[in-house]
Image (tube, rainbow, N blue to C red):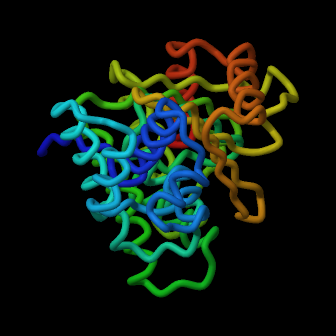
Amino acid sequence: MAMTTNLGPIVQRAMLSGELLRLRRLAGKTQEEVARQFDWSTSKILRIEGGAVSVSTPDLQALLRLYDVTDATELERLTGLAKGTRERGWWQNYPLDSPDFRELLGYEAGASYIRQFEPSIIPGLLQTPDYARIIVREFVGDLGDDQVDALVDLRIRRQDYLADRDPRPYRFFILDEAAIRRQVGATLPHGRSIMPRQLRQIAEQSEDESMTVEVIPFAKGAHYGMRGPIVLMEFDADLGEVLYLENHRGRSRILTGREEEIIEYRERFEDLRTWTASPADSRDLILKAADEMEK
């Protein structure tokens, strides 16, 4: 499969907005001063520096002249970022109703490290097509076959995209034992093999040097993670971390930068590791669950 180093439009927009904020401050100018200089509204500067909108090439060139950026290499880099913000993300052809989930996919496309905890289901980045199909039907609601197929394809495309990146992002998954014990598909005709195949795929993937999978055994008792799933992403660029949260009602929110809540969840993720089995023991637990289901 073809390799890609593209960070995606959302990450490049965040990188560019951060650079423009830094350059404005370095130039000693306020947002109001910049707005007056170009007869723009202050909200336009706010939206550009907040990453809410892309910046056109003429506007970018005007800003860089004002900030006295003359180095050819730097100009080329920033212009390249601006061009990247206007590209279409691979996910934009799929029917997605959640703006937060679209943003998650955009940040995921350029993340260097992805941490995820799931208390009750297999994460989308690890799901087999058969497992994903059942989850989509149960979680998303009354959908036609074409819509289900599209959403299943989206999940597999996510996995392929990250696998094709060079270098691959490091992925660290923590699963509660409930996620590997629930026999998804077992009540369907010919469905008893779905979960064992899913588990064996996870065990195989966990041997990849760019991935870690750890399980919190039932024997560890109650823990903070039972409140809900957590996704944390970090980047090679100076963007801070991104936090994605989703509750049992399917409502989600995404936080970016260096907000205190992101730091708190980062610490909670590390705290969950005090409950997990080692990667090797987790793999054995996953394979044991698969064996028991097959019997």
Q: Which of 259 and 159 is in front in this view?
A: 259
Q: Quadrant of the N terminus?
A: top left
Q: Position of 166 compared to 126: left or right?
A: left
Q: Which residue is drawn at 56% across and 63% down?
A: 135
Q: Position of 263 compared to 192: left or right?
A: right
Q: Which residue is drawn at 59% across and 36% down?
A: 232
Name the residue at the right extreme: 222
Residue 198 visible somewhere in the drawing: no
The mark tally for this picture is 0
Q: Splitting the image into 4 quarters, where does residue 43 fall?
A: bottom right
Q: Which residue is drawn at 69% across and 19% down?
A: 270
Q: Which of 94 and 263 is in front in this view?
A: 263
Residue 16 visible somewhere in the drawing: yes
Q: Which of 101 and 220 is in front in this view?
A: 101
Q: Residue at x 32, y 56 (%)?
A: 157
Q: Where is residue 282 in the image (x, y as percent from the top left)?
A: 56, 21
Please tell me whether residue 261 is drawn above or below residue 212 in the rendered image: below
Q: Where is residue 34 in the image (x, y as percent from the top left)?
A: 51, 53
Q: Position of 155 compared to 60: left or right?
A: right
Q: Splitting the image into 4 quarters, where does residue 231 fall?
A: top right
Q: Position of 264 compared to 121: left or right?
A: right
Please tell me whether residue 196 is drawn above or below residue 130 in the rendered image: above
Q: Where is residue 287 in the image (x, y as percent from the top left)?
A: 49, 28
Please tell me whether residue 163 is drawn above or below residue 188 in the rendered image: above
Q: Splitting the image into 4 quarters, where does residue 66 fall?
A: top left
